[in-house]
Amino acid sequence: MSLSFFLLTDFGNTDPYVAQMKGVLNTLAPQHQVFDITHNIAPYNIAQAGFFLDSTIEHLPPYSITVCIVDPGVGTTRDILCMVLDNKTILAPDNGCLSFLHNRYPAAPVYRIMQHNLPLDYTTHSCTFHGRTLFSPLAADIALHIEQMPSYMECIIPAPFSKNSTRDCRVKIFPPQPMKTDSILTPYMKRHGHLLTDSIVMLPDFLAKVDNNIIETHVLHIDSFGNVVLGLPSETWREQIANGGELTLYTQTSRPLKFISAYAELSENQIGIICGSQRYLEIACNMCSAAQFINLKLGEQVKIGLSVTPEM
């Protein structure tokens, strides 16, 4: 098993920015592969980036390093954050990109990496492209640290160092295993003076709430099929929606809304809400674009009325 990098940006595919980030990673860590999550986050859309991180991270391989660059504050003094989820690392600007991950994994350690304290000789200053000049070198340096960490697997049969043992049973293996009380990056962060933080920028406007049987949320993403992903994590909101009685969707107008478990349960011109594959509730039509049918756009507020008071 080896380390791998995953990139998530709003750069698009027209400019050379993605290739330049990959070039830095391949120069500094040529032994590791670089993969794309997407580079088509809507420009500056921090909430959409946060949704992509939250819905994707569990499917990435162990010891992956994800670099998220959706950064309207590039060139300012905003800090870089490093979140560690077991054996996976996420780098992102401190601007709300980690909001949904932090809500889902509140105990996951987050380190604050200040620009003036970056320990890398090969970082450079840029007013407009920290993805290439700061984040990519930092990701490569973290990968080097993880590679160099020792880890051992002990033999069980024969018992280590017993009279029946014919070899040293402390066998060095990769990847390293984090200690129970520390993250895999604890030694790295301590060495360079980067401290744990429990205060990061969040996106409170995109956290759903319920008031008087009305759930208020926002459109986080519209996929290529026109399904409208809402800021409603399924594990938190599924039961309230499923047990909410008759549902009403309030956008520019009001429409009945059907809770479904498959798109095919919807008839023509019927709107449904379903627990999508990304662990979020989404509004859908059957074989047509719900976003176009309802005229919904990214970031818009959506309200769902319940006829039965939900249990909180």
Image (cartoon, rainbow, N blue to C red):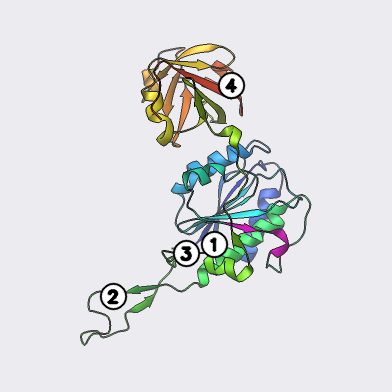
Residue with the mark numbered 2 = 155
Q: Quadrant of the C terminus?
A: top left
**Residue 76 placed where, x, y %?**
76, 50
Disc 4 element: loop
Q: Quadrant of the N terminus?
A: bottom left
Left or right placement of residue 17 versus residue 294 in this view: right
Location of residue 143 with respect to 34 vertically, above or below = below
Q: Residue at x 42, y 34 (%)?
A: 236
Amino acid type for the residue under numbered disc 1? His
> Disc 1 vs disc 2: which is toward the camera?
2
Residue with the mark numbered 1 = 32
Q: Which of the two labelled residues, at mark 1 and mark 4, occupies the earlier sequence position?
A: 1
Residue with the mark numbered 4 = 296
Q: Which of the two labelled residues, at mark 1 and mark 3, occupies the earlier sequence position?
A: 1
Amino acid type for the residue under numbered disc 4? Leu
Residue with the mark numbered 3 = 182
Q: Which of the two labelled residues, at mark 3 and mark 2, occupies the earlier sequence position?
A: 2
The boundaries of the magenta stretch are 111-118
> Disc 1 vs disc 4: which is toward the camera?
4
Dot 2 crowding, Cα within 10 Å, few <14, some 14–19, many 20+: some
> How far apart are the two marked residues, 2 and 4, measured between alpha carbons?
59 Å
